Image (tube, rainbow, N blue to C red):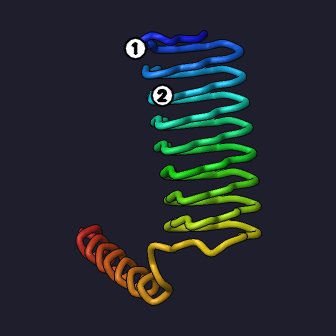
Amino acid sequence: MSDQGPYVESETVTGDRVDLHGGNAYVIKSGETRLERSAANTVYAQDLEARQSAVAWAEADQVNTRQSLVGHVQAEEASVDRSAVGVLHAKTVTLTNASAGILVATQADLKNASAVVVISRAVDGQPVLKFDPRTAVVAGAAAGGVLGLLWLVGRLFGKR
């Protein structure tokens, strides 16, 4: 399916190749998906390329984003350029001038990239972490203290 019109809206789009320019779809299932200035809730594809687009959930073998926003990415290989990703899980990840909330990868290549949590076997480049080690310890202790207080209060009132 290819659309060059000004706006397309669809519930489900399927095909070997989906090119969506300036529209939105709820679910996209395809071999190749190209999004430009578009939005999709869920994308299942072998190859996903998103340019200035938003995707809530993406599962693909290969994911390339540029100036896009993605909630969750599950991929074999992911390349994120000037984009933001909430959760990124892939074997090989390249982040360039990008942000990620949680990054889980076997191999991560970070170039001027920021992340809240990075879990990777091998990391090339230095991530710009949101918390320095001291702040992380203080935040963890504060969270543990609050959870401990809530547990004690629950035990106190739960026995009656």
Mark 1 lies on a secondary structure that is: loop
Pointer 1 local density, CA inside 10 Å: few below 14, some 14–19, many at least 20: few
Q: Is residue 124 above or below residue 95?
A: below
> What residue is at 52 percent from the left and 22 percent from the top?
27
> What residue is at 45 percent from the left and 78 percent from the top?
131
Q: Please state, as top left, top right, bottom left or bottom right, where the C terminus lies in the image.
A: bottom left
Count numbered badges in the picture. 2
Q: Is residue 11 above or below residue 39?
A: above
User: Sequence-wise, which precedes: disc 2 or disc 1?
Assistant: 1
Rounded to the nearest angstrom, the CA distance separating label 2 from label 1 is 16 Å
Q: Residue furthest bottom?
A: 134
Q: Nearer the viewer, residue 31 or 23?
A: 23
Q: Please state, as top left, top right, bottom left or bottom right, where the N terminus lies in the image.
A: top right
* Left or right relative to 76: residue 160: left
The residue to which callout 1 is attached is: 6
> What residue is at 45 percent from the left and 10 percent from the top?
5
Q: Is residue 126 above or below residue 48?
A: below
Give the label on residue 40, or none. 2
Q: Residue 17 placed where, x, y %?
A: 68, 17
Give the label on residue 99, or none. none
> What residue is at 60 percent from the left and 50 percent from the top?
80
Looking at the picture, which amino acid does disc 2 mark?
Ala
Q: Nearer the viewer, residue 114 or 146?
A: 114
Mark 2 lies on a secondary structure that is: strand
Q: Residue 102 placed where, x, y %?
A: 54, 60
Which quadrant of the view contains residue 127?
bottom right
